């Protein structure tokens, strides 16, 4: 119910189109279908629940006002919504004086080795499988840094601090990882 | 950029991956604003950003959904100016007293022990003349008492279906006032559950958006309001009875 994955993306797209026409019922449907997922996005990035709630409220206010800007040719509805939530949450994180004291990042080895199960791979879309595979080809330290950056929205400086590595090295690892990822996904 | 996958020995030129860094979220506030301004005036850069968003999109599947506090939806409805039936805004007038839940908790603590003790007896008394409609599922109860402990309303709640039955017990409501029922989850503001009939037991169906609030520890309360109910979605009149929801 609450997970975006269980909601048909084309249905979500239709609701967004209706929201763009000012349909408050459709807006409620979008809220029901995606708010828990988007709250998860915000909670991963922001240090407190109240920050996450504030941002989620902003995100939905924004959805109501800017649903017309959703372009189905550029992104799936949930990608558009989640990226909007990430951007808002990251901006909030940057503006907050007390950035979260994030957990140390262990680069020596993979802690969160999320090797997908066979079933999960079979179920996954092509895009997902390709990203999994290309992420899997990155050196563990690059993969860990890129994942942490994506889910927590933290700066290079923070990643350097938390991993106990020099800033220059962290930037270099991430940039090389990104270039590598792009090349791999374009093959 | 024609970096091959194996080519991991050299750094990509500075600025070549700004779109990716923006999407990944590693840029500081100033660099984010610069990137956004660039998206506005440089369509090719905007397309690059969209490209990175779709590359990373599968990672979104890994984010675990977190249940949203139910009070958020009414707040959003209010923020965008769409009708919020039976729900409330924490910014509504008269909210300040109700918002100090510390006070609320303190007020309810004393009355609750006594109310809980008399709950069973109370139900027998009120059920004899007018049997409560049968309720299936997980049952919760609450006794709403005055500050002196006198019970004014009894409630049985089926959290599964969102059905609530309120039984008034000798309540007097002034002619120019109505009784309005509220639910206040721990740490939250009051949410209206509608007007009560002070003379007769009535079933109330709680809107789906508030159903999660029907849980032990939440408070139910009755306030006196002008005809038609509290005008701004928050209680304005005196609280005549309150009680905590408990599992039967």
Image (cartoon, rainbow, N blue to C red):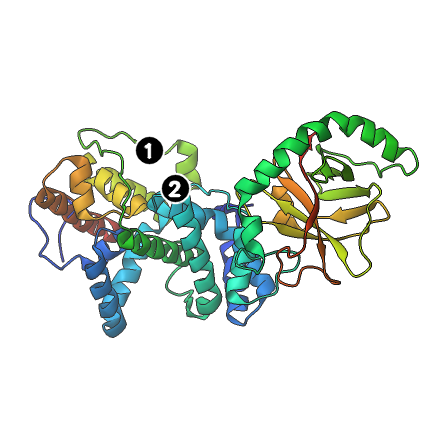
Task: Say if A151 sits above or below A113 in the image.
Answer: below
Question: Is any atom of residue B78 visible in this view?
Answer: yes
Q: Residue at x 44, y 48 (%)?
A: A39
Question: Local crowd at mark 1 within 10 Å, few (<14), some, or many (≥20)?
Answer: few
- The chain letter under disc 1 is A
Question: Looking at the picture, how far across and down is residue B52, in whole percent?
Answer: 28, 56
Front one among A174 and B135: B135
**SS label for mark 1:** loop
Front one among A77 and B193: B193
Front one among A123 and B197: B197
Q: Residue at x 47, y 59 (%)?
A: A60
Task: Say if A137 sits above or below B198 in the image.
Answer: above
Query: From the viewer's perspective, is A104 left or right of B147?
Result: left
Question: Looking at the picture, how far across and down is residue A154, in whole percent?
Answer: 25, 47
Q: Residue furthest bottom?
A: B41
- The chain letter under disc 2 is B
Question: Is any atom of residue A139 visible in this view?
Answer: no
Q: Residue at x 56, y 57 (%)?
A: B89
Question: Local crowd at mark 2 within 10 Å, few (<14), some, or many (≥20)?
Answer: few
Query: From the viewer's perspective, is A129 left or right of A107?
Result: right
Dot 1 and dot 2 residues touching (CB under 8 Å): yes
Name the residue beneath numbered marker 1.
Answer: A114
Per the rendering, the mark at residue B62 is: 2
């Amino acid at each position: 119910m609450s997970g975006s994955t269980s909601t048909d993306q084309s249905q979500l797209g239709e609701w967004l189109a209706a929201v763009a026409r000012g349909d408050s019922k459709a807006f409620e449907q979008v809220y029901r279908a995606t708010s828990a997922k988007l709250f998860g996005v915000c909670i991963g990035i922001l240090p407190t629940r109240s920050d996450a709630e504030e941002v989620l409220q902003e995100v939905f206010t924004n959805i109501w006002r800017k649903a017309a800007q959703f372009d189905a040719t550029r992104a799936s509805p949930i990608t558009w919504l989640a990226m909007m939530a990430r951007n808002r949450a990251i901006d909030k994180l940057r503006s907050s004086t007390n950035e979260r004291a994030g957990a140390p990042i262990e680069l020596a080895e993979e802690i969160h080795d999320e090797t997908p199960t066979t079933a999960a791979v079979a179920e996954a879309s092509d895009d997902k499988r390709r990203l999994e595979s290309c992420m899997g080809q990155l050196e563990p330290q690059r993969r860990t840094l890129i994942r942490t950056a994506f889910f927590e929205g933290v700066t290079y400086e923070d990643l350097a601090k938390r991993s106990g590595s020099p800033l220059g090295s962290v930037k270099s690892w991430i940039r090389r990882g990104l270039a590598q990822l792009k090349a791999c996904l374009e093959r | 950029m024609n970096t091959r996958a194996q080519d991991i020995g050299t750094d990509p030129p500075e600025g070549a991956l700004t779109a990716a860094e923006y999407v990944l979220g590693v840029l500081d506030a100033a660099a984010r604003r610069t990137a956004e301004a660039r998206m506005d005036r440089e369509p090719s850069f905007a397309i690059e950003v969209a490209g990175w968003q779709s590359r990373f999109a599968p990672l979104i599947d890994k984010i675990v959904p977190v249940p949203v506090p139910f009070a958020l939806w009414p707040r959003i409805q209010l923020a965008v100016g769409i009708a919020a039936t039976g729900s409330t805004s924490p910014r509504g007038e008269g909210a300040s007293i109700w918002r100090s839940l510390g006070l609320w908790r303190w007020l309810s603590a004393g009355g609750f022990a006594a109310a809980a003790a008399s709950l069973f007896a109370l139900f027998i008394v009120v059920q004899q003349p007018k049997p409560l409609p049968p309720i299936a599922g997980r049952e919760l109860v609450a006794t709403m008492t005055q500050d002196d402990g006198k019970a004014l309303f009894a409630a049985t709640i089926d959290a599964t279906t969102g059905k609530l039955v309120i039984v008034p017990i000798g309540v007097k409501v002034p002619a120019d006032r109505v009784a309005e029922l509220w639910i206040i989850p721990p740490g939250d503001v009051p949410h209206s559950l509608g007007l009560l009939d002070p003379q007769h037991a009535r079933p109330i169906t709680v809107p789906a958006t508030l159903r999660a609030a029907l849980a032990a520890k939440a408070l139910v309360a009755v306030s006196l309001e002008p005809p038609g109910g509290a005008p701004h979605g928050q209680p304005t009149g005196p609280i005549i009875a309150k009680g905590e929801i408990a599992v039967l």
